[in-house]
Amino acid sequence: MKKWWLFAGLVLMTVSLSACQDVRMFFKGFEQSFKGLEMTVRTYDEESQVIDQIDGKSVMIERDKKFDTTNGESTDKGDVIKVTIGGNELHHVGSSMIIAEKGLENVFDAYTKKVDVTEMDRSIPILNSMLNEMKNSFTGKNKVILIRSQNGTPLATYAGDSVSTYKTDVPKSTGILIDGKYLFVYRCDYTIYDRALLN
């Protein structure tokens, strides 16, 4: 009888953790390191024109550590990205870059208008902030991500029902989990809205 309860407890824990965004992000990183992700790599100029685009089935993104500098005990992380695509690699620094996992749809045209939001709902900001952090870690939120070049020209727009943001090892970049798919944003301006603000 004890084995049955132990098994039931493990199943319940596994199911509850599988709904956790942080666990999904951990496994996405593991998959990226050992299998690679099917992704599209795009770099942009200041006017949001695509400079180049590469599609790959086994893509891994990392900071190229040979460009780090060490000053005594501290290390300054370099800005150079190394993207492994199959057996080949590319190095990138400087211009805006978006790397999107296959299955993510750029809904730029649906949100090309400038956003004007008025929110008059009264609330307790500290509690809302704590609740939003918990949702980021466990369930994600229904959000729209507007991405711009470094001079503010619109580049891309993504939306999802379960969106969470994560830091990466690469300076000036953000990892975003959108409905289980990974989006990597480097040297871009962006704003992430709760979709309810745009309705």
Image (tube, rainbow, N blue to C red):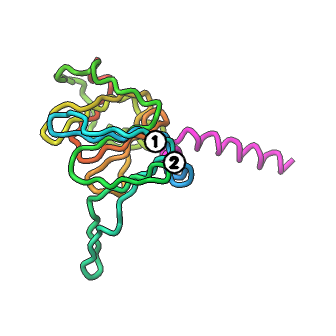
Does 12 appear in magenta?
A: yes
Q: Looking at the image, can residue 15 be seen?
A: yes
Q: Which is more toward the observer, 81 or 128?
A: 81
**Mark 2 closeness class: few <14, some 14–19, many ≥20 residues within 10 Å:** many
What is the secondary structure assignment of the residue under circle 2?
Answer: loop
Sequence order check, earlier mark of 1 and 2: 2
Instruction: Residue type at mark 1: give it.
Output: Gly
Q: Looking at the image, can residue 131 be seen?
A: no
Image quadrant in which you'd find residue 110: top left
Residue beneath label 2, please? 36
Q: Position of residue 88 (x, y in %)?
A: 44, 53
**Mark 1 closeness class: few <14, some 14–19, many ≥20 residues within 10 Å:** some
What is the secondary structure assignment of the residue under circle 1?
Answer: strand
| Residue at the spot 44% in from the left edge and 32% down from the top edge | 162
Please give the range of residues in magenta: 1-27
Give the overall secondary structure of the magenta segment.
Answer: helix
